[in-house]
Image: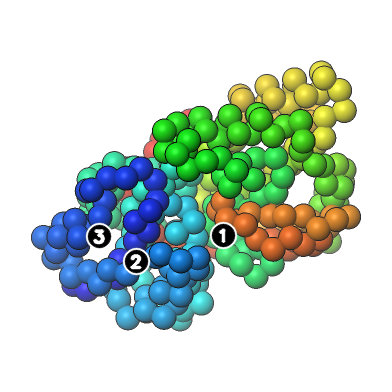
Amino acid sequence: MKALMIINPKAGRSNRRKTAEYLRRVFRFHGYDCDVMTNAKPREAESIARSMAEKYPLVICTGGDGTLNETVNGMTGLQNRPPLAYLPTGTTNDFAESVGLSTDISQAIRDALDGTREKLDIGKINGRCFVYVASFGAFSESAYQTPQNMKNRLGRLAYFLECVRELPSIKAHRIRVYDGQREVCRGSYIFGAVSNAVSIGGVLRYNRSDVDFSDGMHEVLLIKKPESAGMFRRTVRALITGDYASDGIEAFRAKQVRFESEDETAWTVDGERCKPAKTAEIKNIPYAMEFILPKQLPSAS
């Protein structure tokens, strides 16, 4: 069987076993003749997926969340979308953790070969798709500011350290938030996320039992600008424990949400920068992408 493999050789920690030739040999042994395309430039994976994916019964994406995002954006416009197997080799791998994909390359390959097909929701912000999160503010820029060598040595800890370092200079955005035509909340926020994940940026987490990847809904989380030391402490405690019933946090679920900001706000999608905008229209696209996932999914916790 033919398969298209899109690989980012620079993602995550260097490992010879993750080279294109190694992966090609392994999949050939299991009956897949892979055409390997390397994602070396920004948006190249998206272009490859858009122009080639429809010709194959299977697409295999190897890299980090950014490579996955590009591949999905390339595939969503296709009339006949093949299933997508994802081999996570990035540094944080939020999507992989959420759906139970292993970051051990050997196990990830076994899951791709023996897994089950599941149609999952994705999101769209101002016309661009995202797999698991669109966010702005405090924790969104850490992925870009943390040095690559620090990411490779410390993994998730690097993101947490960078978030702590940037707290004194965080800019608050005055935003009105609408669920359809109904205003849900307004205020000054230092962070916001619309997600379909249990982990965001390796820093924020939801209880697994609170997230359904195929229910047509996104989780919306907003962190208010702290007005006092007490509010700041309560907010930090809530973020650590995952109990978001705090006066410093707005949390709800929505199919479609609109953010109207007084200034241009820089959003990221799956950790990749978007063009700043005053308005962000975000909607859930149910059952939009068929992934190959492990037969044994993570238990709710």
Pick the front one: 89 or 107: 89
The numbered dot on residue 20 is 3
Badge 2 crowding class, 10 Å Cα cut-off, few under 14, some 14 to 19, many 20 or more, is some
1 vs 2, front mark: 2
Q: Image check: 6 left or right of 222?
A: left
Indicate the amino acid at tag 1.
Answer: Phe
Q: Is residue 176 visible?
A: yes
Residue at left offset 62%, top offset 57%:
273
The picture places residue 276, in percent across and down from the top left corner, at 74, 60
Indicate the amino acid at tag 2.
Answer: Thr
Q: Which residue has dot 2 on it?
A: 38
1 vs 3, front mark: 3
Hey, which quadrant is residue 168 in on the image? top right
Hey, which quadrant is residue 119 in on the image? bottom left
Residue at left offset 20%, top offset 60%:
21
Element marked by disc 2: strand
The picture places residue 204, in percent across and down from the top left corner, at 59, 35
Q: Image check: 187 left or right of 190?
A: right
Residue at left offset 57%, top offset 56%:
272
Pick the front one: 65 or 96: 65
Hey, which quadrant is residue 36 in on the image? bottom left
2 and 3 marks in contact (CB < 8 Å): yes
Badge 3 crowding class, 10 Å Cα cut-off, few under 14, some 14 to 19, many 20 or more, is some
Element marked by disc 1: strand
Q: Image check: 44 left or right of 27?
A: right
Q: Between marks 1 and 2, how big is the CA–CA gap?
A: 21 Å
